[in-house]
Structure formats: C-alpha cells, structure tokens
Amino acid sequence: MRWIAVWRRNFLVWRKLFIASVLTNLADPLILLFGLGYGLGALLPSVAGMSYMAFFAAGTLCSATMFTASFESMFSGFSRMHGQKTWDAILYAPLTIDDVVAGEIMWAASKAWLSGATILAVVAVFGLATSPLVVLTLPVAFLVGLAFAAVGMIMTVLAKNWDFFSFYMTLIMTPMTMVSGVFFPAEQLPKPVLAVAQVLPLYHGVELVRPLVAGRLPGNVTLHIAVLLVYAAAGYALTIMFARRRFSI
Amino acid sequence: MSAALRARALRKSYGAQEVVSGLDLEVAPGECFGLLGPNGAGKTTTLRLCLGLSRPDGGEIELLGEPVPARAREARRRIGVVPQFDNLDPDFTVEENLLVFGRYFSMPASAARAKVPSLLDFAGLAGRGDARISALSGGMKRRLTLARALVNDPQLLVLDEPTTGLDPQARHLIWERLRRLTQEGKTLVLTTHFMEEAERLCDRLAIIDRGRLIATGTPRELIAAHIEPQVVEVHGNGFDAWMQHARSLAPRVERAGDTVFVYAADVAPVMADLRGRTDLSYLHRPASLEDVFLKLTGRDLRD
C-alpha cells in the first residue's frame, strides 16, 4: 500500500486545480453528448429500445472514462515522469518504481472514475436513466478507468517524447471508440470488425453500462468484467516490466 | 563499528562500456567522504548503485548495514539524497514540497508539519513556505533540496555535486550547512569536481577515474603521497624555451596550455633562475589537491 503516497501526491495537486480540472474533463464529453444527442436524437427516436440520447449517454460515460484515464496516465504521467522528474525524487524515498507505477495507475483510474460518475450524475439529472440499477455503472467506470490507465501507462514508460502518444491516440483509441458501440450499436458492424471490437476493452465497458442505463441487468457479466480485469492486470504487469527497464538500469 | 557504506568489487556496464570497473569504497560513520573524478568517471553511477537505484553487474554493497539492492528500500528510510539536478515538485509550494516528501517516508502528517519550520530555517527560507518553486533562485532551490533530503532525519546524506552551478555566496552557505550536518554526527557522501570543496569539507577522499579507484586518503595524505609540496606556475612569452631549461632545475615539469607547472620539494633553484626575468611571470604556491587530481587523472579534456 506504499503507492498511496504517490496517489495522494497527485490528488493534492488535483485538489488545488479542482475547478479547472473538472471543467476541462467534462466539457468535451458533455458538449458531444448534448450536441450529437439532440441532433441525431431527433432523427433516430429509438435505438436498441432506448432513446438515442440515453443510448449515446451510456456510450459517452464509457468513452469519457477511457479518455480521462488515458490522458492522465499518458500526458500527465509523462510530464511527471519525464518533464518534472517527480518520479526520480520519489525513488530516493523508501519507494520503488513498482510503487510509483501502481500509484499513478490507481490515480488515473480514480480520476477517470470521477469523469464517469459526473456523466452519470448528468444522466440522472436529465432523466435519461430512471432505474436504481444505474448506480452499478459506478464500479464499472472504475474498472474501465483501471484498464485504460494501465494500458496508457505502458505507453508512458515506453515513450521517448510526446509525439509517441499521438500514435496510440490516433491509431488505437479513435478507431476503438468508433467500433465499440459508443455512437451506434456495434452489432451493425461487419462481422470481422465486430470480432476485433470484442477483444478491445471499451466494447466490454459499453456492454456493461448500456443495459444498466436502460434499467436492465447486462448479460455475460463475468466475461465483460474478466476482459477489463485482464487488460488492467496485463497493462500493470507490462508497465512494471518496462518501467524497471527504464529506471533500474 | 561497522561502515556506513561499503562497496566491494563494484561493476556496472552500459552496453559495451564499463562505467564502474571493480570499485572498492568504505565510508566510516560520521565522516564526510568525497568522491572525486573528472566528468564521466562514474561518480553518479556509483552513487546510484549504492542507493539501490541501479542494479550492479557485479560486486557487493552494504548501506547502513543493509545489503543493496536486496534491502535498499529499508536502507533508504535512513538516507537523504540531494541529486545533481534539482527535481523539486513544481506543482507545490516550498512547504508542500517538504510535507509531500515526508509522506513518501510514511511520516504522519503532524510529524512532517512539526518539522517544517526548522527545515525552512535551516534552508534559509523561513517565511517563504508559501512561495512557488519557480519563484526561487538557484541557490534557494539547492537549499530546499537539501532541506527536503533531511525531512526523514537521515543518518547518511548522499549529495551529487551539491554546489555545481551556484555562485560563491550560495556555495559558501551550502558548505556551512553541510559542516553543521557533520557536526550533528551525520555521515555525508558527496561527489564533486571542485577541489576547494573537497579540501574544505571532506575528511576523506577517493579519486576515481574511468570507473576505477586511483587514490584514497585525507586531503593532506593525498597531497603528501602523490605530489611534490611546492609548485611554481610560469607563463609569458619565453615559457616554451624556458621549459626545456627548467627540466634541469626540478624533478617534474608539466605544461598545460600556455602555463608551465614546476613541482619540487625545494624550488629555490627555480626561483633563483626566474628572478630578474622580464619575459616570464610566475607564482610560487604550496601544492594543492588540484595538483594531485591533475597528476592522477591527466590534463586532457574530458567530455
């Protein structure tokens, strides 16, 4: 539990910049949600048995969580690791690179969870979800955050410079958002594309969150949770491996 | 009493290049120990190995009685580190830097908070607790980094070039603080390439070059053992011709740029020869640690 000191360091910085941080984190997904939701919602009154607005809100909850986890673990993490040398200073204390990486991943997951939770609050306030089941999206958001924080952190400990992240963003995250059922049901995709989507973590997050927003229990719960957990665990293990290579040489 | 730091046959390579090649070091508790060497001699790598931040390819390290790297974490509880380049946390104020660092040592918040005033005082930053890091001068940052290294009340401090890049005023202030710490009984291990710093601060020195230990002892012992006690520096238009002649007057004559260095136990013949010469200027002085350093590591540029 030594990683908590690292988590608290980041929390303390976040608390100082609380308002700006929350606003910038939420502005993007909410603009997209209301812009696209109202616009497309007028054309598509019902998708998969729910209003397009509610359908898209469920997707947004997952994609916003993914983006927050990824940005925090990659851009903010790289700034702390590479620019500010904050990790170097922490390693003089009785902490190891494993503790630092664990603290960073948990922090990015926590911040991502907050994004998901705030979208959930908006969803509830606007009456897009009425069933109490929707509360179960909270643990799912944390799991989605954990998976993307862990994968993003691999990129961070491998990165030589900032440009490195644009490959991951453009070539992986953007297509993943398109095929994972955020904007439209993934089942509409050609079979091979759907098969690819089904091995990606975002798809499984959406599969869990959308039924809960609609007031139903999702199917294949174990499978979806397992995939997210595997991404989190594998991401953590690979991050540790590469981080040790980078720092303990 | 066992050593505060002991390294045996330490080895470390980066790729094909061996940076540390079988180094032995021993630092006694309470002493100020200096690691001297030209750029690229392996000083920083040696410190990183001793702290358990880097894995040696061979050899044994014992730091405050703990085997490193196996139990480096336990050893680092009682150690403070001042790195070569400041890495204070720019997201925090002066005081927050100390508090957050205390947390990395699992210090209770109240204990860390209670230490802050004395640490700020030690750093000459009393009343500046709320200042942002970007508002501090280079000297202030260095002092805060030193204060940060003391947050856990360490037995041993590791300082990598503690005064590089500081002006003389700031340097003297750091020296005074470091002396105060040795008087309190703390063990200091520092690297430097300022001979004056080594001579003033260190009880004992190790000169290393190309990853090897080439001499060790107190500053006085090193001077006595490795160099003639008197030096005459000569420069001016006729120095080239005079240099040939000087070889008959003294046992060791060296040239660096446009200056001739004459080393001897008795420089009377040299001084007699120089008296009355108008084409040469000269300076007679006792041999210093810098002369030893240059003799042992050579006068060639290191980059």
Image: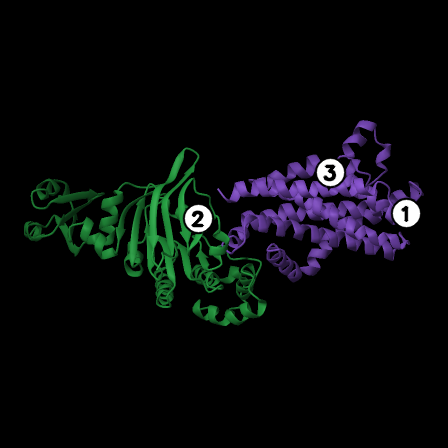
Chain colours: A purple, B green
Name the secondary structure under disc 1.
loop
Dot label at residue B48 = 2
Q: On the image, numbered disc 3 is attached to which residue?
A: A174
Q: Nearer the viewer, mark 3 or mark 1?
A: 1
The total of numbered circles placed on residues is 3
Q: On the image, numbered disc 1 is attached to which residue?
A: A216
- Kindly report the distance in space between the C-alpha atoms of the residues bearing marks 2 and 3: 41 Å
Q: Chain of mark 3?
A: A
Name the secondary structure under disc 3.
helix
Query: Given contact means CB atoms under 8 Å apart, are the residues at marks 2 and 3 in contact?
Result: no
Same subunit: marks 3 and 1: yes
Q: What amino acid type should be assigned to the residue bearing mark 1?
A: Arg
Assign the N terminus of chain B to one quadrant of the image: bottom left
Q: Is residue A170 above or below residue A98?
A: above
Q: What amino acid type should be assigned to the residue bearing mark 3?
A: Thr
Q: Left or right of B39: which side holds A133?
A: right
Q: Left or right of A131: which side holds B113?
A: left
